[in-house]
Image: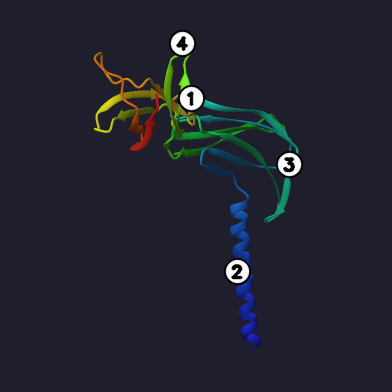
Amino acid sequence: MRRWQIIFGACLVTLVTTLSLAWAAQEYKTQVKLSGTKLSVQHLVEGKDKIRESAVLLNKNNKIVARWKQRTTNKWYKDYQDGWKYFRYIPYIMDMKNLPAGNYRFVTTTTLANKQSFKETRKIKFKPKVTMQYSKTKIVRNENGDIWQRLYFKKKASAGKMCYAQIFDKNNKLVHSVKYKAKNANEDFAFSWNGWGRGKSAKKCPKGMYTVKYWMDGVNPKTAKFRLSI
């Protein structure tokens, strides 16, 4: 019985030690999280001296697309790992929704109390989910008093992408088409139609049900039904 207690105790000590080392290795390091378009960085800096730190986000062309001003912090933590160790986390957050998908580099510049400075780089692969969805239609009036029918679409991660829409009548004949280059990632795409067909000899389309086919670069085409009411 005594022997099994000794063996069990040794195994328990080994397990606790392993878990402690794994926890420490996972806990005390720079943490980079990208949830959807939200970037969160907890930059680990060792030591307890006063520091100053700034950061930038660079795209694949080495162009700065985001900048964090220099900040200071005197708050630090300590833990015993083969001797007392001191550390702190410097937080950085941003929403990358208006940036195109691609590879980025997050670079921090840390300046110590003795004026020495060092840089650290973390690679970030930004690949947001690209979506486009028909939302609604309503009747609008322009500045000249003309009546139009406006179609609205919700979209995400569309910065710099081309958006397309085509309208077909009940005979599957194309009667109207538009395209638009998105400037912002989550900006709603909308266009107005006066109900007239294509070309110089086009006629006014009758009221009734129509099909809109829409898509965006990187998104498969979809269709939706709507009623022309003008």
How far is mark 4 from mark 1, CA to CA? 44 Å
Q: Comparing marks 2 and 4, which lies closer to the viewer?
A: 4
Helix, strand or loop for disc 3: loop
Badge 2 is on which residue?
15
How far is mark 2 from mark 3, CA to CA? 31 Å
Vertical placement of 92 versus 7: above or below? above
Q: Comparing marks 1 and 3, which lies closer to the viewer?
A: 1
Badge 4 is on which residue?
144
Q: Comparing marks 2 and 1, which lies closer to the viewer?
A: 1
Q: Residues within 10 Å of mark 4 (few under 14, many from 20)?
A: few
Vertical placement of 146 versus 186: above or below? above
How far is mark 1 from mark 3, CA to CA? 33 Å
Q: Is residue 82 left or right of residue 134?
A: right
How far is mark 3 from mark 4, CA to CA? 67 Å
Q: Is residue 2 left or right of residue 176?
A: right
Q: Do the residues bearing badges 1 and 3 touch, measured as CB atoms within 8 Å?
A: no
Q: Residue 49 location, x and y as percent?
A: 74, 38
Give the position of the N terminus as an image quadrant: bottom right
Q: Residue 183 location, x and y as percent?
A: 46, 24
Q: Do the residues bearing badges 2 and 4 touch, measured as CB atoms within 8 Å?
A: no
Q: Residues within 10 Å of mark 3 (few under 14, many from 20)?
A: some
Q: Is residue 56 left or right of residue 140?
A: right
Q: Amino acid at mark 3?
A: Lys
Q: Is residue 157 visible?
A: no
- Say which of 3 and 161 sits in front: 161
Badge 3 is on which residue?
48
Badge 1 is on which residue?
63
Q: Comparing marks 2 and 3, which lies closer to the viewer?
A: 2
Q: Residue 114 location, x and y as percent?
A: 71, 31
State which tag comes first along the sequence, 3 or 4. 3
State which tag comes first along the sequence, 4 or 1. 1
Q: Amino acid at mark 1?
A: Lys
